[in-house]
Image: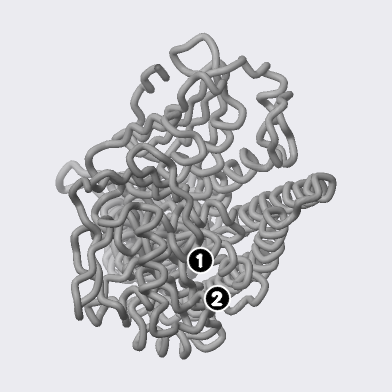
Amino acid sequence: MSRNSSLQKRLGIGLTLGATLLWLLGVAASGLVAQHEMNEVFDSALEETAQRILPLAVTDILNRESNTGNRTAPALKEHDEYLTYVVRDRQGNLLLQSHDADPGIFAALPREGFTNTSTHRIYGASAVSDTLYIEVAEPLAHRREAALEAGIALLVPLFFLIPVSLFGIWWVVRLSLRPVIEFQHSIEARGASDLSPVNKDRLPEEFEPTAVAVNRLLERLNRALDAERSFTANSAHELRTPLATALAKVQRLKTQLEDQHLKKNVVEVEQALRGLSTLTGKLLELAKAEGGGALSQQPHDLVPILAMISRDFETLAPGRIRLTVPDHEVNSLLDPDAFAILARNLIENALKHGSVQQPVDVIMTDDGRVRVCNGGDIVPPGQLAVLRNRFSRHDTKAAGSGLGLAIADAIASGAGMTLHLRSPATGRADGFEVEINVPHAGRNPGPCT
Amino acid sequence: MRILLVEDTVGLGEAVRDQITEDGHAVDWVQSLRFAETSFRTTTYDLILLDLMLPDGHGLDFLKTIRSSGNSTPVIILTARDQVSDRIEGLNAGADDYLIKPFDLSELSARVAAVARRYRGNPNPLIQVGNLEVDLRDHRIQCNGQPVELTAREWALFEGFIQRPGMLLSRQQLEDRLYAFGAEIESNTIEVYVSRLRKKLGRDAIVTVRGMGYRLETHES
């Protein structure tokens, strides 16, 4: 799993959290402004109430037969008072109060202007040459309740707006990143051998340099692989031609010699040249196998190639190869040259190291798996494990370079396949089997008969 | 057979030429495409041995040219290019066989013989014509059950007859088979070799068609 999180996810979460935070800050600011404005309105109402009631209270008090003594203004109708008031003289003697007023919330002496107690906001005003004071009180709880309700009124829409903005942000991010995701999928979907340039037409401007860099890299890789293939091919030509000349000359010389001692020496030179030819060929094959290029850009039918390679051995080991191939095409992105080298090495290995009395089965199944099985002694597990190493040879008297399985393994690895070595072969008590695990839907292999 | 060998590596060309000549074929050896084209235009060949990487071009171009002209002379490619895709390309261009360097000269001889047999429509190397039993693989002839020894030039001429039993071969066709042995073809060379073959195979084995040429008899004499 990748440690790098998705850009889409990161943008979605980041933008949503950011937008939510901004919404909350906006609501908080609005709430503060609303509270400030409400306080002004409430204060104004408080002041206005005092101003309105004071003349009436003064008239009421002055019209009394006795100016002293508290009177409670009767309630016309039963109700709760948000605003309560008291009218007092300069010494704090209570002269008049509203019916819900609690004289305890007021200070001992009357004061003009706005004052706060722990529970109330109070406004005081005076009349008749500062001999009568009215104080109107409003509970702070009332104001808090109003501020709370206003805040809730601002917050409630957020419960709907945040999911909507989340969805909107996700949708916009997804829509904007779609070309990038398509670009990513197109790179993921292409085969390991596909070195053609990536399409950057629909990519956003910010990602274009990445695509350009990828294309430059692919081009360089392609050139390097071509150069390597070309070098291998040229090396093959430059090495094979003088070897062919030397071998042909020696073979001609052999036919012309009468002296048996000289002839024996020439035969030894011929054998050495053959060995050198074989080793050169194997080393070139290994160089090609390890140099990549095991996959091609286009699929190829492997059936005729396997048939051709099997036929090549017919003169060397007449009748020993039993070829079983499907009667339809088996297309694969495996490079035909690489597959031919792989098949040749596996068959050569089986013919060389298998029992000469038993046939070599070369089987290709419908799903493209290739198995080469031969009879003969069981290869112990310890030796089986090291057979694919270079210059590693099973304890055998047969001539060989010890590179065949290493070449086949390098090609299989280069193509993302696995070379399975088994001994005894599937479905039998002896022998050796090699299977290439071609990436197709597998089937249970039948026995090597 | 008259064989055109196109090979620019001198040592290899010499060895192949000597081997094929020893097999009883007449070989014209050229080292470039230019000479190959000239030789091909002037002489009829039974088979071409063609190297691919030549100093003045690619052997496949030569092969494609002769195939596009409708010529079906068998061609065996001799090359150091060992990739199966090269081989497929060569075979698709019209080659009959593909031999990768380095090769055994004996394998080359066998492939030359096999391709020649296939070209004549009879892949069986054992041929019976009249009282003659011929094994093309090792140039063995039995006449009435008795082995017959032929020299390389006699075999070269005889192979021309045995490939086309009952068919008339012109003096020129027969001379072409001997020409590459390097010998000057004198006016009576063909008569001399036909006479030698008659001595070894029987008087009536080869019939003279006056003014036209010679023909191998197909019925027992």
Q: Nearer the viewer, residue B183 or B25?
A: B183
Residue at screen point 48% across, 70% down: A113
Q: Nearer the viewer, residue A284 or A242?
A: A242
Q: Nearer the viewer, residue A147 or A160?
A: A160
- Residue A351 pos. (x, y %): 55, 31
Residue at screen point 49% across, 73% down: B27
Residue lying at the far left in this picture: please name it: A77
Q: Amino acid at mark 2?
A: Glu
- Tell me, for residue A301, which label it has, or none: none
Alpha carbons under labels 1 and 2: distance apart: 8 Å
Residue contact between numbered discs 1 and 2, judged by CB atoms under 8 Å: yes
What colour scheme governs how the chains and residues are painted in the rendered image of this protein? one colour
Q: Amino acid at mark 1?
A: Leu
Left or right relative to B219: residue B147: right
**Residue ID for mark 1:** B78
For mark 2, give the secondary structure.
Answer: loop
Residue at screen point 76% across, 51% down: A258
- Residue A231 pos. (x, y %): 63, 71
Q: Quick one: label 2, few (<14), some, or many (20+) residues within 10 Å? A: many
**Residue ID for mark 2:** B7
For mark 1, give the secondary structure.
Answer: strand
Question: Would you say residue A76 is visible in this rendering?
Answer: yes
